[in-house]
Image: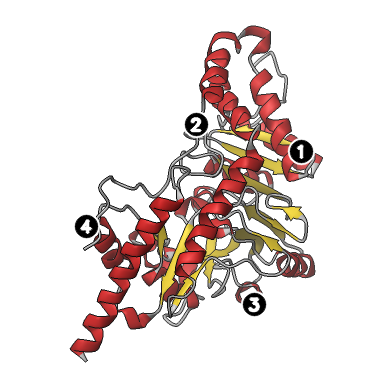
Amino acid sequence: MIISTERIPVAGPSITEREAELAAEAARTAWYSNHYAYNARFEKMMADYVGVGHAVSVPHATSALHLIFAALGIGPGDEVIVPDVTWIASVAPIVHLGATPILVDILPDTWCIDPAAVEAAIGPRTKAILGVDLYGSMCDWPALQAIADRHGLHLVEDAAEALGSSLNGRRAGAFGRAAAFSFHGSKTVATGEGGMFVTDDPELNERVLFLRDHGRNPGDRFFQNHEIAFKYRMNAVTAALGIAQMERIDALIAHKRAIFSWYHERLSDVDGLTLNVQPEGVENSYWMVTAIPCEAYGFDKFSLMAEMNSRNIDTRPFFSPLSTLPAFDTLPEAKRFVTAHDCGQFIARVGINLPSGYNMTEDKVDLVCAAFREVLAGGRTHRVAAE
């Protein structure tokens, strides 16, 4: 059995002396009149990179989405159509605001929300559509925008996993009314925790700035709160880490794409195995390398993970359908369009994320791929023998 002599983690950042130096500088100097300088710089770098007019730094992508939906006026009695297969953070803010997420299927290739399923789920209470750029893939944003325009709905982009991806020359984060990014320690740009709201809509931007700081007008010095709102501000040290990361964003994206290319070269000939796709017009930043083996191998994602773990290789499961989680047991109305035959049900049952951190080298990818091939071959052999 192939076993790695060192533990290979599934994800991790690229941190240099520049990040440490700038974080220390912010800790020393980001006070008094300079308290927001690092945040403002990070925000401008993000807005310029994405190609939008406004960016607001926040503690995490969840808070960015919370602010977006709150600023759009989503609340009790409203419905927001969302993908069934995504991380719960994409959908939790909708529930926090008293609205109902309506779960629909994903596409079999990009693993993003299916526009046809969105169209079929629109009803009189539908107020918005949320697309999630899963694992670096891009949603079919033109199709989703056409649906939103036709029905008078808000369109929101969860780009938490897709920084650096693009569709028809437009970068992730530039679609819909607004978008959210994540800088969690596993993400392409990492600050430990952290997020960013981005938009081209100046009025929505002003509303988010108001809601982000306890319902005060930006620049308020008299602590006059006009609404009970939120406290969603990023600290300066986190922003400094983000600046240092964005200074080499092109190199970070290139590294992610190289990691995927190494996996693709070594696994593309494996029968019945699907990896991340890059449709025409899309440039995928490949946040995570994701593998979907066919049923013939006889594995679900948890048994695959156990086999890889026994070889000292860490993996992650493909996100489970939200409709299958105990957290959604009390929301039957959210699941009314989900069926057992949905593409997402199968993909989420068998898919795993392979090690994709910045510590990955070609030699490590060689080892992971050899181990993964061994696991898959063993599963298929065992299944054939059993039959």
Foreground: disc 1 or disc 4: 4
The circle on residue 15 is 2
Q: In the displayed structure, would residue 79 be above or below residue 258?
A: below
Real-space Cα separation, disc 1 to disc 4, in angstroms: 44 Å
- Tell me where residue 280 sits by quadrant: bottom right
Real-space Cα separation, disc 4 to disc 2, in angstroms: 29 Å
Residue at point 60%, 72% (across, down)? 114
Residue closer to the observer: 143 or 220: 143
Between discs 1 and 2, the one toward the N terminus: 2
Q: What's the amino acid at mark 4? A: Ser
Neighbour tally class for label 1: few under 14, some 14-19, many 20 plus, Cα within 10 Å = few
Residue at point 28%, 45% (across, down)? 6
Which secondary structure, mark 2?
loop
Between discs 4 and 3, the one toward the N terminus: 3
The circle on residue 48 is 1
Real-space Cα separation, disc 1 to disc 3, in angstroms: 33 Å
Q: What's the amino acid at mark 1? A: Asp
Foreground: disc 1 or disc 2: 2
Q: What's the amino acid at mark 2? A: Ile
Callouts 1 and 3 close, C-beta under 8 Å: no
Between discs 4 and 2, the one toward the N terminus: 2
According to the image, label 4 marks what residue?
310
